[in-house]
Image: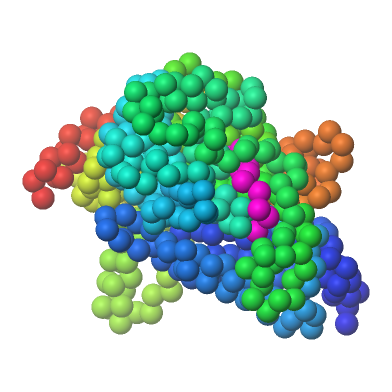
């Protein structure tokens, strides 16, 4: 037995490990890390949301079955690797997809099925709240769901005693504490970055709405109390331990950090909590998170404002579409190779086609593509139609074709980020890239650098994901020194010495993307016509 394995076994025996669990949209993942924050065991559970009575939801039994299964899978992995039961842990953190609506009465009964972030049923409420607050309130935010229920005259609203997110619900059941990390809370209701709490002026405006006179509660009475990273958020109760571990082995009393949303854990996992840094997650959808030095001059419907886990203001640009259309074209090339009787290694095919794109004209030679498999609210589309357009004199070849689809994958994102850079003059030192678009080394990274005109870094640990990110936040709560900031903790104790590759923006690429995006914006009317006619 190696000394390293022996050390890990001692940490497991003595409760020196840290557990992070994140409930994502398709997978619940549990990660156990050691004293050096290295993952030493993991478990997972696959699940899917359901469309029931017009709402995307997960049933309560799905939540608890999935959570217990993910934990059991983790405990089995510990047993398999180290021949030890998992009985005690140094700290735990829970995170989940942000936003949504979980409303409970005074007897802790769920009043209506969980309404997830995916629902787009709150348009009226979101618009009215934008006008009331002069602050962008996306449809997926909890306050939009609440106000829409009020506007709809839903009977359950008068019985609400507590409103929280999925992560907040899990934390409450595990600890008995009705609290929430500031990052997740910022997707429920706007946060004042000065107080790191709900914006009091907006709270008062909401409570003063004429509709609110019908209800026996005020907004703050039903929202979770806000905590920042590093604060203690309770301990695992006996009931919580039994809810999590059906075997009965896990001991109660474990410290638990504030529950967070998946945006906050992504920032922690990519070391993107410092002001003037950000991260881009690019896969089926794409979003960027830019940590701001100051508040924006005004509200923009294209920009969501949330916070880091320690309360710094973050501008989020979220786009529904990224690689789906690009992947569909790669599938066509794969089908062609197979029709020719050739074996098509998918990773190699992506590498060949992505790298071919780098040979294309910087502005894509006059080609255009819209990757809208679904609607793209950022550019004003409720529906999408994937569309490729060229003129007779465009430079139509494989390199330009592939470059066009790479540009298109980030085009809507660039439009949103250009608001930050050109209208708000936000300064950004570095973007951390993670997700499928960056899998082919150097290509997606270079295109992203051209879109944002900032250096883009991809780190080896970026793939560890949100469960690792919430484990890091739990470690910070447990280990932080007096006055040690989250930024310093991550920089000096987690990411120091981590390998990463940084690409600087190429001036010719930046100018080429600029020309492409100008043509793209003018041609949005073509995409709109396709939606209307096809």
Most distant residue in the top direction: 297
The residue at 87%/36% (across/down) is 482
Q: Nearer the viewer, residue 16 or 176?
A: 176
Judge from the rendering whether residue 32 lies leftward or rightward of residue 36; answer left or right.
Answer: left
Residue 53 in sight from this viewpoint = yes
Q: Nearer the viewer, residue 334 or 524?
A: 524
The quarter of the image holding the N terminus is bottom right
The residue at 37%/23% (across/down) is 209
Question: Could you say where residue 193 lies in the image, as x and y percent from the top left?
Answer: 61, 25
**Quadrant position of residue 334:** bottom left
Judge from the rendering whether residue 44 lies leftward or rightward of residue 411; answer left or right.
Answer: right
Question: Could you say where residue 517 lies in the image, as x and y percent from the top left?
Answer: 33, 33
Q: Nearer the viewer, residue 491 or 107?
A: 107
**Quadrant position of residue 382:** top left
Most distant residue in the left direction: 533
Q: Nearer the viewer, residue 445 or 23?
A: 23
Residue 53 in the image: above or below residue 504: below
Q: Which residues are magenta?
A: 174-183
Residue 285 in sight from this viewpoint = no
The residue at 44%/25% (across/down) is 207
Residue 489 in the image: above or below residue 75: above
Residue 444 in the image: above or below residue 428: below
Question: Could you say where residue 147 lies in the image, as x and y percent from the top left?
Answer: 36, 35
Judge from the rendering whether residue 455 lies leftward or rightward of residue 51; answer left or right.
Answer: right
* Number of numbered discs overlaid on the protein picture: 0
Question: Could you say where residue 533 lies in the image, as x and y percent from the top left?
Answer: 8, 46
């Amino acid at each position: 037995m190696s000394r390293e394995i022996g050390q890990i076994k001692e940490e497991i025996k003595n409760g020196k490990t840290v557990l992070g669990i994140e409930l994502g949209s398709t997978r619940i993942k549990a990660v156990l890390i050691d004293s050096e924050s290295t993952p030493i065991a993991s478990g997972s559970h696959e699940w899917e949301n359901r469309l029931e009575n017009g709402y995307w939801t997960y049933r309560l039994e799905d939540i608890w079955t999935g959570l217990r299964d993910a934990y059991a899978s983790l405990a089995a992995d510990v047993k398999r690797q180290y021949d030890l039961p998992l009985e005690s842990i140094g700290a735990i953190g829970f995170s989940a997809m942000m936003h949504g609506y979980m409303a409970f009465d005074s007897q802790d009964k769920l009043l209506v099925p969980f309404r997830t972030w995916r629902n787009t049923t709150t348009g009226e409420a979101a618009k009215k709240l934008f006008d009331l607050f002069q602050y962008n309130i996306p449809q997926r935010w909890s306050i939009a769901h609440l106000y829409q229920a009020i506007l709809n005259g839903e009977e359950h609203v008068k019985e609400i005693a507590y409103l929280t997110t999925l992560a907040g619900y899990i934390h409450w059941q595990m600890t008995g504490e009705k609290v929430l990390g500031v990052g997740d809370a910022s997707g429920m209701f706007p946060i004042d970055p000065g107080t790191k709490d709900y914006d009091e002026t907006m709270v008062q405006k909401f409570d003063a709405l004429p509709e609110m006179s019908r209800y026996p509660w005020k907004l703050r009475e039903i929202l979770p109390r806000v905590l920042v990273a590093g604060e203690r958020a309770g301990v695992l109760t006996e009931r919580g331990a039994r809810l999590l571990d059906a075997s009965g082995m896990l001991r109660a009393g474990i410290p638990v950090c504030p529950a967070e949303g998946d945006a906050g854990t992504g920032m922690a996992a990519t070391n993107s909590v410092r002001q003037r840094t950000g991260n881009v997650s690019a896969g089926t959808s794409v979003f960027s998170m830019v940590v701001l030095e100051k508040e924006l001059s005004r509200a923009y419907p294209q920009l969501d404002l949330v916070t880091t886990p320690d309360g710094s203001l973050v501008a989020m640009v979220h786009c529904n579409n990224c690689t789906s259309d690009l992947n569909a074209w790669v599938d066509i090339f794969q089908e062609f190779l197979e029709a020719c009787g050739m074996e098509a290694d998918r990773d190699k095919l992506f590498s060949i086609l992505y790298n071919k794109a780098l040979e294309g004209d910087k502005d894509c030679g006059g080609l255009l593509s819209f990757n809208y498999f679904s609607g793209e609210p950022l550019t004003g589309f409720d529906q999408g139609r994937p569309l490729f357009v060229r003129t007779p004199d465009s430079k139509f070849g494989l390199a330009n074709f592939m470059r066009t689809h790479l540009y298109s994958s980030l085009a809507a994102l660039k439009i949103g980020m250009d608001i930050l850079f050109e209208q708000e003059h936000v300064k950004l030192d570095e973007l951390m890239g993670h997700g499928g678009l960056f899998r082919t080394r150097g290509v997606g990274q270079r295109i992203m650098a051209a879109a944002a005109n900032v250096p883009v870094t991809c780190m080896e640990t970026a793939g560890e994901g949100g469960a690792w990110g919430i484990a890091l936040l739990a470690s910070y709560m447990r280990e932080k020194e007096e006055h040690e900031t989250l930024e310093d903790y991550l920089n000096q104790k987690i990411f120091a010495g981590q390998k990463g590759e940084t690409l600087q923006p190429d001036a010719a690429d930046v100018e080429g993307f600029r020309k492409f995006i100008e043509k793209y914006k003018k041609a949005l009317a073509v995409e709109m016509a396709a939606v209307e006619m096809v």
